[in-house]
Image (cartoon, helix red, strand yellow):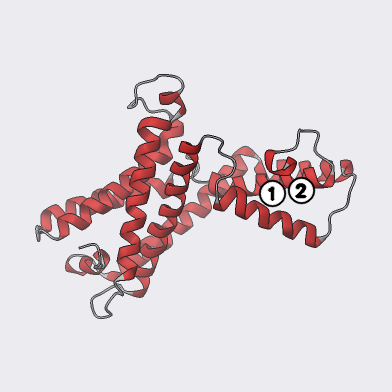
Amino acid sequence: MFTSNPFAELTVFLPPRAMQVYIVLMIFAVIVGTIADMIHKSSAKYFALRQKKLKAAATRQLSRADKASLALKTLVVEVASAGEFCNPQRRISHLLMFYGFLLYLGMTVVMIFGYPTHATPTPTIIPLLWNIGVIMLLIGGYWFFFLLRVNVAKDGQPMFRLVPADLFIVTLLGSVSFALAWEIVQTSGDLVATRITFGLYILFTTLLFCSVRWSKLAHMFFKPVVAFQRRVEEASGASSLPATRNQRS
């Protein structure tokens, strides 16, 4: 079960082209949602004005090599290892979700576009990595949802009391939970149950990627930019804030 391509089974009731078009539409939805979020929050204008202001306040001019080094540090510390999280549990949860999401999303695209039917056998490693990504997301996501959310862990609110900030985690967990359920149900041979679980999987996945304007998904793109800018400000002497832990060390 965990080593076979679940999307190749869709040919029973859905042409391969349909899922390929769906992926393209979801990519478009993320782009539009991110741009809409930037316009709503005036993010591009804010960063442009801030860069102009801090450039004037800089006491040291950074070379391209300096900026490349800072960009690499940002990728390693803030992106690859989630260095901004001081709470080790929150950091592990984030890393499980981050790398799980990359595996889940990446292998989904590979299976749908590279191996859409059984005519081209799918290498075992691809669906296996997809399932590993799903399991990582479920562990990290449910750990965060039930134990680490601020309004649950710090504010003492009931765990099922949802706020707008929970939109991303709820739709993400819905997507991967029904993805696994759909894969398991497929093995039973029950076409009706397979269609229902697949429909729920697509529903939550669509909500996940079409709600970028209101969810935290766009933060995946903004946070590295903010972290890089902070490093540039510190290195150029333009920042009036205390140096970060990584800068001090």
Left or right of residue 182: residue 106: right
Q: Amino acid at mark 1?
A: Phe
Q: Residue at x 38, y 31 (%)?
A: 147
Q: Which residue is tagged 1?
A: 228
In the foreground, 117 or 183: 183
Q: Is residue 187 visible?
A: yes
Whether residue 31 is situated above or below residue 40 in the rendered picture: below
Where residue 137 appears, as percent x and y from the top left, is 37, 48
Q: Is residue 214 visible?
A: no
Q: Residue at x 45, y 54 (%)?
A: 99
Q: Which residue is tagged 2?
A: 232
Q: Please tell me whether mark 1 sits on a helix, a strand or a loop.
A: helix
Res 113 → quadrant: bottom left
Mark 2, other Cα within 10 Å: few <14 / some 14–19 / many ≥20: many
Quarter placement of the C terminus:
top right
Where residue 208 appears, as percent x and y from the top left, is 40, 46
Left or right of residue 97: residue 7: left
Q: Are marks 1 and 2 in contact (CB under 8 Å)?
A: yes
Whether residue 203 is situated above or below residue 244 in the rendered picture: below
Left or right of residue 208: residue 231: right
Res 65 → quadrant: bottom right
Q: Residue at x 44, y 57 (%)?
A: 102
Q: Please tell me whether mark 2 sits on a helix, a strand or a loop.
A: helix
Q: Residue furthest front?
A: 249
Q: Residue furthest bottom?
A: 119
Q: Amino acid at mark 2?
A: Val
Quarter placement of the N terminus:
bottom left
In the foreground, 144 or 190: 144
